[in-house]
Amino acid sequence: MLQTIVSGLESGSWFALLGLAIVVVMKAADVPNFAMAEMGLVATYVGISLAAAGLPFWITVLATLVVGIALGVLIDAALMRRLSKYGHFPLLLMTIGLSLALNAVVGLLWGHAPRSFPAPWSGVSVGVGGGVSIGVSQIVSIVVGLLGAVAITMFFRSSTGSQMRAVAENRATARLIGVNAGRLSAIAWGIGGLIAAVTVMLQAQSSLVSTITPTSLIIYGFVAATMGGFTSLIGTFVGGLILGVIQQFVGTYMSTAAQFSVALLVVFLVLILRPDGFTKGVRLRDV
Amino acid sequence: MLLEIEDARTGYGGLEVLHGVSLTVDEGEIVTVLGPNGTGKTSLMRLLSGVLPLWSGRITFDGKDLGKAPPNKRAGLGLCQLPEGRGIFQTLTVGENLDLGLAARRASGSAAKADRDRVLGLFPELAGRLDQSASSLSGGQQQMLALGRALMSQPRLLLIDELSFGLAPRVVRDLFDVARELREQGVTLLIVEQQAAALRVSDRTYILRGGRNELTRNSDELLASDELVSSYLR
């Protein structure tokens, strides 16, 4: 039971982080990014290769994060900025195309065999009594997820963050008073790439990742973002955690085959019952 | 000459709305543009802020041709707009809204703080409400906030679209007092209005009609002859 909850919170942290990355880009750049999980995969694979080449662990972590940021900023500058004048739909299609393209590139360069990102604590676990033991990598995922959520929330309280919220509320007026929406879009894509890299890296230090990882990760990320109504950071984070726990219980007590359907059922229910996100009206301060 | 518009034409899609408007604003002046609904006053504002493209003619600000500069660039040059309908961000706090005015320029922490204090001195009503949601303010307070935010960006020329929009006459009088105070601080104002009350604070007035210049006078001249104003504003 405890083991199931911890495992649920672990994968829930990944879903929550990816959901937050989606929400950040949605706010500033106004596009649902379907390539988010693939961006994280590319960055993580670069890190895995560097680790295999013998670089120290923390250097490879840093490199992974830098690749994630660079990828985000590059995609924004090279692709999104050019398309933005044509409206939402081409942008959305571009992110879908990009997810397929990045996935194919990873397959070509690194192959389709599952890989892991070995951390110094990988495979180590601590006993918590009653014969239950919890992996250190699980604790790392949960703690990093929590820290990430706090950091993003604090970022949105900063002056750059409040400019982003202004753009999210009314882009035209924000530009009129001097807000540089292009700069904010680059920052948001950079942050999105960073969080995506962290997410996939967390998954890779705990289990295995491969080119099929993003397919489910992106859906769970979008489910989490939907639970936050695509605006609320707290809603997205808590939504991701809840989703992780539900999904883990379904896997343990029903069947792993049902996990995916249950996630989609959650979206279905959220959209019907609370289309603005399930924390809406609880009067948490949305950003 | 701070702002010079020569024979400007613009419109929406294929529809021309301004058929060659000319206008000048000197440093330190308060200029009003009056005209009934649908004469292109708001289009003139949008043209100046860079939302509408200039079809032909010329706009120079501080000697520089504005050309196709995007809105945020123009704000950075000191051509700042108080948008119609105030443009207050309801999901932000009063303080956050105020600080958005800094987006147009680079300001150090202490300079920003000094600006904030100066603006709050002008609008003491806002001082106690910095942490409140902006949506909790009354219409008049939101207009003060919009003015305050514009002042945070240290504008050289402040464009004001309908200062009196939807406000009680008493509040409008207060805001016009603020406008006068601003001039003393060296801010130049271009106010677009439907209400003739704006004449009282301004030096010169342009009356637009049907997207063209109809009349240009010193404001006190217009004030002295009520029928002149009313005949043009009908």
Image (tube, coloured by chain):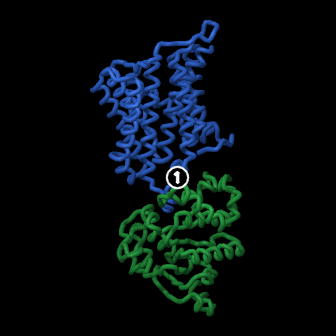
Chain colours: A blue, B green
Question: Where is mark 1, residue-wise?
Answer: A163
Relative placement, left or right, of A173 versus A65 is right
Q: Residues within 10 Å of mark 1 (few under 14, many from 20)?
A: many
**Image point 67% across, 64% down: which residue?**
B141
**Image point 65% across, 76% down: which residue?**
B177
The percent coordinates of residue B62 (x first, y second) are: 41, 75
Relative placement, left or right, of A54 versus A287 is left
User: Which element carries disc 1, helix, strand or loop?
Assistant: helix
Quick one: A34 or B73, which is closer to the camera? B73
The percent coordinates of residue B94 (x first, y second) are: 64, 56
Relative placement, left or right, of A117 versus B102 is left
* On screen, residue A175 above or below B194: above
- Which quadrant does the N terminus of chain B fall into? bottom left
The percent coordinates of residue B221 (x first, y second) are: 58, 92
**Image point 66% across, 41% down: which residue?**
A284
Say which amino acid is labelled 1: Gln
Q: Quadrant of residue B160?
A: bottom right
Quick one: A70 or A216, which is closer to the camera? A70
The residue furthest top is: A131
Relative placement, left or right, of A85 versus A110 is right
Callout 1: residue from which chain?
A: A
Q: Is residue A271 visible?
A: no
